[in-house]
Image (tube, rainbow, N blue to C red):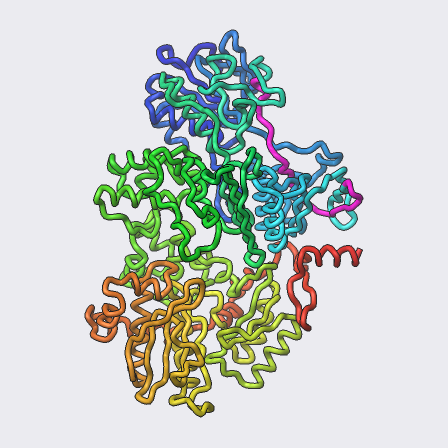
Amino acid sequence: MTTTTPLSSVKPHIVVVGNGMVGHHFVEQLIAQGGHEQFSISVFGEEPHLAYDRVHLSEYFTGKGAADLAMTDGSLYDDNGVRYFTNSLVSAIDRDNKTLLLEKGDSLSYDKLVLATGSYPFVPPIPGHQRGNTFVYRTLEDLDAIRDCAKQVTRGTVVGGGLLGLEAANALKNLGLETSVVEFAPRLMPVQLDEKGGSVLKGMIEGLGVKVYTDTATQEIVDGEEAFHRMNFADGSHLETDLILFSAGIRPQDALARQSGLEMGERGGITINNQCQTSDADIYAIGECALWNNRIYGLVAPGYTMAKAAVGDLLGDNSVAFTGADMSTKLKLLGCDVGSVGDAHSQTQGCKVFVYQDEISQSYRKMVVSEDGSKLLGAVLVGDNSYYDTLLQYYLNAIDLPEQAQSLILPAMDGAPAALGVESLPATASICSCHNVTKQDINDAVCQGAMSVGDVKGVTKAATGCGGCAALLKKVVDSELLALGVEVSTDICEHFAYTRQDLYNLVKIEGIKTFKELLTKHGKGHGCEICKPAVGSILASVWNDYVLKKDHISLQDTNDRFLANMQKDGTYSIVPRIPGGEITPERLIVLGQVAKDYNLYTKVTGGQRIDLFGATLPQLPEIWAKLIEAGFETGQAYGKSLRTVKSCVGSTWCRYGVNDSMGMAIKLENRYKGLRSPHKIKFAVSGCTRECAEAQSKDIGVIATEGGWNLYVCGNGGMKPRHGDLFATDLDDETLVKYIDRVLMFYTKTADRLQRTSVWMDGLEGGLDYLKEVVIDDKLGLCNELEAQMDLVVDTFQCEWKTTLEDEEALKTFRQFVNYEGEDSNVVFVQERDQIRPATDLEKQQLIAKAG
């Protein structure tokens, strides 16, 4: 391809150098506004792939392929006459002749040139940084190389504790490596977090088994004695590791612009104006290579805004300009919530600060407000991002703070102001920062016929970037639809145009047995974190199939996938079922012996079971083999299912008891132990009205009377305790079980995902009275079906751990590392009250110092 004239003799020629996310977005915007009819367009990318989603790059290590991350397959370009070239590096710009020289020797002319060359990873010039087994984290090829190396080694270290560094650490951990992070600054994420927030985040990440070294400078990298590398630190300490991944920041990819003589920033970056023009009016720069007002913007959202500004200028619309961007961020790093808004470091003169910290739940929240307390200037969130959307809108739209502003970061209390509703947001409120979508944009889309969240996404692209605004987007769309008098969609997510109840009915009526089959018949796309576990729960409720079956395992969260509850230090708890709390001395001895053999922390729970804490992943099958042999079953403590049936000793032992509460508790627990439901369920049976088992605070509560049993339904403990409602009185054993069957199956059939029984009943039109009509009077004619479905669940019960121990493929799930048979050295215990507990950070350091 050698040419010195535009590819079209009629249309001016626009050349885009760089086909990353921002370069691709520029082309999308140009096409959307008819620019392809005014210009010939050529796109050059140096990678072998067309544009792909770098924001979700780490998902490449969790099952997604290049095709899943691709932002286009080329059809958009082909359909609109855009010429595109991969593996094509532009080596020089001849501005005088408006010609580009390609590395392969070809040349072509341009009328307008758009530089979207992005950035490159900064690798600190540490002696030894070019050794083997050293990588950066930028392209799919980088990730392929990291994955290949990880198959051969056991330890990996990330140099850099910023946003990208922690994403890279998560990738190494997902690959099964013992992972460390080395950060030069005194805290993690120094740009986004203050000192305390960084400290809390460090503790959370270390609790997940990742070693963190802050305020640490690497002086050199040499051969290790026990690993491939030895990193020598400035303080005289060192770290041995097999793989090093540099993620210490980015630098603008501006060499091409520098060669051509364009104006540059003192520390790099191509200088641009508000229309993203460089010092040459025919050349634009957008994204991470561009320098606006002496600042490089390292997030995709500002790059998209630059792309729109450049398109506007090219098409004669100067109303769109780039005038800076908000750098607030909401992230989930290594499973930890992190949020940063505005002036997170309290640098504004005269500002005031509110701080809330909960060391037990590892939550830290800070608000920075104006001197008079009327405006939010910034915020830091670590451990819980549920406050982020409200705080961001107060900040972006300069909304006056409530009188008790600190309540915005405090746990919910009576009298506290309600969270900021979407109706209170101005039309200019930014809903999606990645694509610069405002509340007005969403209103316009709805008014023009977008009748669902999916429709609005298609029109505005909101929530298609990082996805962090998805929940807020749905609220705004629902609000706008209601304002127009339109019935709001109750679709479970964008992949299924159905409610959970609809999906339940489809699965049952059509005999659908897998998520893939349901998606093929009634959905679209690949599914998400909302629909996958919901469908997994439905499949288990209807067919009671094995949850770790090949077709089901990808739908499960961590606890269900490993049939155990993960604890804060990365170990797991063992909770065998003990129906009614009744246990023989022989089985009690087995539990004690297992706890002793594996050095487990032992606790009697509030639900009359025994928890054994501190088991590592590979130990789970070994321990359960011993428990199964002794006659125990899985206790389902990890599932959305029946947890426990609490009981007193009843008439068997107690002088006040009027009925056999122990016998009924065991009967009920054995009957319903296999039921998967929308949320966890707890029972209790009390032998008299003295209520020693606290039955009225449970989803299903049974209290003995002289005339039989009183049944209470839809109570719960937890964060919002609620007493159950009296449902029926003086029931015999058969009727009691029949009513419970019907209530539980009606709940399982009709409740929303993750909806507790109390919330479900309150949401029924008619509430308790309606539920009585359905269950007792058979108002809907469903009772026979509900009982038959429960009988199926009871008849097909299987102990999931027993099934797992008999399945060689399922047992592969319980390897700590895919390439290493040893133990996780990050799991450290200390003794307290004659038992183990997870060591604190300080205790770990003291143990290491003592051993060294």
Q: Is residue 310 left or right of residue 79?
A: right
Q: In the rendered view, does 718 fall on the left or right side of 354?
A: left
Q: Is residue 638 visible?
A: yes
Rendering coords of residue 492 (x, y %) = 33, 52
Q: Given the current orientation, which residue lies at the most extreme front position?
A: 372
Please check the rendered image and state whether residue 255 is part of the magenta-colored stretch, yes or no: yes
For the residue pair 771 and 414, the one nearer the viewer reads as: 414
Q: Is residue 279 above or below residue 231?
A: above
> Where residue 654 sits in the image (x, y, percent)?
46, 90
Q: Which residues make up the magenta segment?
A: 234-257
Q: Is residue 572 left or right of residue 237?
A: left
* Total numbered labels placed on residues in the image: 0
Residue 65: horizontal and vertical position, in percent? 48, 43
* The furthest residue to the top: 96
Q: Nearer the viewer, residue 79 or 35?
A: 35
Query: Where 539 sits versus 15, above or below?
Result: below
* Residue 143 is at least partly visible in this image: no
Residue depicted at 48% across the width and 27% down the height:
324
Q: Position of residue 172 (x, y in %)?
A: 60, 47
Of residue 37 and residue 601, the one placed in the foreground of this image is: 601
**Residue 9 among magenta residues:** no
Quadrant in which the C terminus is drawn: bottom right
Image-based side of 368 in relation to 248, left or right: left
Question: Residue 391's quadrant in the figure?
Answer: top left
Relative to 287, residue 656 above or below = below
**Residue at figure coordinates x 56%, y 82% from the top left:** 587
